[in-house]
Image: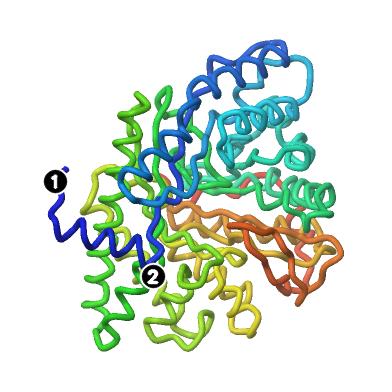
Amino acid sequence: MNYSADEIMQTIRMVQSENLDIRTITMGVSLRDCAHEDMAACCRKIYDKVTGKAEKLVSTGEAISREYGIPIINQRISVTPAAMVGEACDNGSFVDIARALDKAAAATGVNFIGGFTALVHKGFTKGDTRLLAAIPEAMAVTDSVCASVNIGTTKAGINMDAVARLGYIIKETAELTKERDAIGCAKLVVFCNAAEDNPFMAGAFHGPGEPETVINVGVSGPGVVLAAIRNHPEWDFSSLASIIKQTAFKVTRMGELVGREAGRRLGVPFGIVDLSLAPTPAIGDSVADILEAMGLERVGGHGTTAALAMLNDAVKKGGAMASSNVGGLSGAFIPISEDAGMIRAVEEGALGLAKLEAMTCVCSVGLDMFAVPGDTSPEVLSAIIADEAAIGMINRKTTAVRVIPVPGKKAGDYAEFGGLLGRAPVMELSPYDPGAFIRRGGRIPAPIHALTN
């Protein structure tokens, strides 16, 4: 890869004044060879494998950051879905696996480790069932472990038995972590069409089709895109799309440079760069601000979905031109708690859950990091998941739900998570009961366009 002097100077400016950073270098580690019939032995193998492979991950990221002058915010680990790894164990609890992963994360210095995962889009194995049962306690007793469950795909349809079960799992997780505003739910993602190479938490896992180890990079640049748009207030949408593509191109090139260098130093193959506009609570690092810079008075008003569709498409096109290794989720994230502009829109009544759901039809990834009243029923939580999964299934895209029912809180209150997770206004939900719908169970069949062979 060759870089011009002008491109290097533009990238330096983005880093210094526009919040450009590498959001995460994530090492994927296969744990297939850690399976063992004894849970204690399995956990020892997991700890040894993860710490052995990722021993130098954090120090390598820090060295690259210093040498290249590029902020690298997080180093993380994703592992083979734990439901697969622990399935052979005939004793112990899957919470033991979560503890082993948490211990390994602490030893390597990463802030999150993802892969306490089950893939149940067509049904449950013994390991899946045990892992699902362990999620609430695992999220409560660990600091760094993230969980995910894939409940649907375009090819398979939606496993509504899993959807129904997850409403209760989320409620139990919230109750076990109620002293911290149900933060355990912030580490649990429910997917449709989950990506096997996603480097972003909380949904990262090392998919069955991935190599033994791999380096995936997540790049984030809302501030860079915002600056580009604000510099051209008079441009029409065609011209605006072009400047967004050019910006995404530069950001992606930087991400691939870092990923390949990290892989070289660690002796691990480079996988993908995920170009997702992932906001933070910091001022100027907001996807909502980008949409408002296009001319919207407030995110959530009419025109929001169209603006987000254009943004997401332009980002993907720019990334695809910059690298043949674009993967993961790659688009625009619209979490509530992690985006100051989104929080403002909810506070002012401009944005509600119905409009937020409509926006997820055209962006990555879904209904993310939003708080709901603590007395929300499990069936309502399941119905929210089912709606979002249907969007993913029909539109052949990854969608996800990270919903946080905050015990003791009602609409208009706030949940406080701190750090990158931010704070979330508790959103009002529809008062109507979907319980009879959820209790039907079974599987929503795959759509007709799944028959592509």
The residue located at (65%, 38%) in the rendering is 145
Question: Of the numbered discs in the image, which one, if any, rests on residue 153?
Answer: none
Which residue is at a point 73% across and 74% down the rendered structure image?
Answer: 428
Residue 449 can be seen, yes or no: no
The answer to whether 182 appears left or right of 330 in the picture is right
- Position of residue 301 measured from the top left corner of the image (x, y, whole percent): 51, 85
Mark-to-mark CA distance, 2 and 1: 32 Å
Which residue is under mark 1?
A: 2
Tell me which label, 2 or 1, sits earlier in the chain: 1
Which residue is more in the foreground, 446 or 96? 96
Q: Is residue 350 above or below residue 10?
A: below
Tag 2, which secondary structure?
A: helix
Using the rendered image of the protein, determine whether residue 364 is visible from the camera's viewpoint: yes
The chosen color scheme is: rainbow
Which sits in the foreground, 264 or 43? 264
Q: Is residue 261 left or right of residue 189?
A: left
- Give neighbour class at mark 2: few <14, some 14-19, many 20+ (Cα, 10 Å): some
Quadrant in which the N terminus is drawn:
top left
Residue 407 spot, x, y in % from top left: 84, 60
In percent of width and height, residue 112 lies at 59, 41
List the residue tagged with mark 2.
309
Residue that appears at 56% across and 68% down: 357
Q: How many marks?
A: 2
Residue type, label 1:
Asn
The answer to which quarter of the image holds residue 381 is bottom right
Whether tag 2 and tag 1 are in contact, CB under 8 A, the answer is no
Counting from the top left corner in percent of width and height, residue 438 is at 74, 55
Q: Residue at horizontal 61%, vertical 37%? A: 120
Q: Is the C terminus in the top left, top right, bottom left or bottom right quadrant?
A: top left
Q: Secondary structure at mark 1?
A: loop
Image position of 363 (left or right of 341): left
Above or below for 194 versus 352: above
